[in-house]
Image (tube, helix red, strand yellow):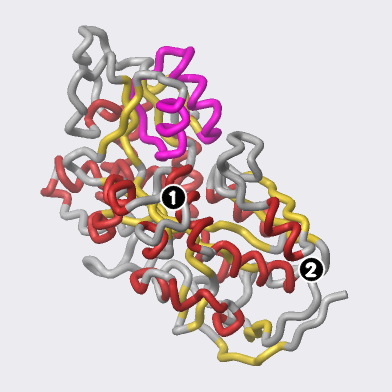
Amino acid sequence: MTHLKLLGTTTLALLTGLSPVLSQVAEIGPPEGQVNIVAWPGYIERGETDKAFDWVTKFEASSGCKVNVKTANTSDEMVALMNEGGFDLVTASGDASLRLVAGKRVQPINTALIPSWSTVDDRLKNAAWHTVDGVNYGVPYMWGPNVLMYNTEVFKEPPTSWNVVFEEMTLPDGKTNKGRVQAYDGSIYVADAAQYLMATKPELGITSPYELNEDQYKAALDLLRQQRTLVSRYWHDAFIQIDDFKNEGVVASGSWPFQVNLLKAEGLPIASTIPKEGATGWADTTMMAVDAANPNCAYLWMEHTLSSNLQSDLAVWFGANPSVPAACTNGSGMSTAESCAANGMQDFDKIRFWTTPVSNCSQGDGACVPYYRWVSDYIGVIGGR
């Protein structure tokens, strides 16, 4: 049985213009026996992929909460799953989190019930992608850049530009890049094209890859249509991308450190870099469903995710940065100051983190292309339109 009390909070004006009356858990009761989580691949490990990485088994034993995980490969898929219901928590990236708040699919988090909240990176505690009008809707989990993954037998030196995946060219091995590169199968990838254009076509006046007027947006779509003639696959499954680099001749693509680490662990000639144009990135937040059936287990899990040994090992496993900075240096797990530096711990201000594009933005006359068009138009790009 669920035992909790609710606190009333303010009414918020959200992205959709809706103003839901909010409530949050005020007291944690006995665990319900399970917690159901939507998560990115590799985010919640129980030692099945690698016995050295398991942050579920001990939690289940100590809490009495069985952890059930449904993996999702894109933010759009996460939002769809949360809309369907049946889940308690989601590890949402910034291009999903505000949509979940606006859609009234997640509830405010009572940070007073999370003892380790004080250890969270101050840069993340009130981040714009999970805080609305001063109300917090999530617990920071992990953050990092979208890297350019490449084959070191083809690129003897790290590629310095994203042009290797956007522009047709001859690669250092004397062969074309056509059919040997990939792009991400998610509409937020429009921002990657926009970021590339920020550097290569400054006359467009793009100030944020998530705030595009009609002309800027058209230029991004034109670049993506050009890229369509080069890509062998639009990837969304991390393990399929891994197989493509191993067996299908793919040599360069935007990727996550997770794939890079697994391929390198197998001894394959793979490395990654952040090119001169910079990178988009993700800062993911554990958010709780508004109708969570297992809120007590959910709060116990959110506290568990901030333990420094989990954060330390998670950062090494995924090649990203912990939301608890002490996890880099306190020796609680596998991370070190050097490994966190290599993962870009000091590059926070250089990453343009995923966020949901909205129609009212800060540049020009305030009219920008809304996200629903990103979704439909990127489907058209992938389909060759």
- How far is the residue under mark 2 from the one under mark 1? 29 Å
Q: Main secondary structure of the magenta part?
A: helix
Q: Which mark is residue 315?
A: 1
Q: Is residue 363 above or below residue 7?
A: above
Residue type at numbered disc 2: Ala
Q: Position of residue 2 (x, y in %)?
A: 83, 76
Residue 168 visible in the snapshot:
yes
Q: Position of residue 331 (x, y in %)?
A: 41, 56
Quadrant of the image for the N terminus? bottom right
Task: Confirm whether the magenta stretch covers residue 239.
Answer: yes
Q: Who's the residue at 19% across and 33% down the image?
A: 161
Q: Secondary structure at mark 2?
A: loop
Q: Position of residue 56 (x, y in %)?
A: 66, 52
Tell which residue pokes out farthest to the front in this image: 331
Look at the image and give the residue range highlighted in magenta: 236-265
Tell which residue pokes out farthest to the right in this image: 1
Callout 1: 10 Å neighbours few (<14), some, many (20+)? many
Task: Confirm whether the magenta stretch covers residue 217.
Answer: no
Nearest the viewer among 260 and 225 is 260
Residue type at numbered disc 1: Ala
Q: Which residue is mark 2?
A: 293
Q: Who's the residue at 74% across and 65% down the image?
A: 63
Callout 2: 10 Å neighbours few (<14), some, many (20+)? some
Q: Earlier in the sequence, mark 2 or mark 1?
A: 2
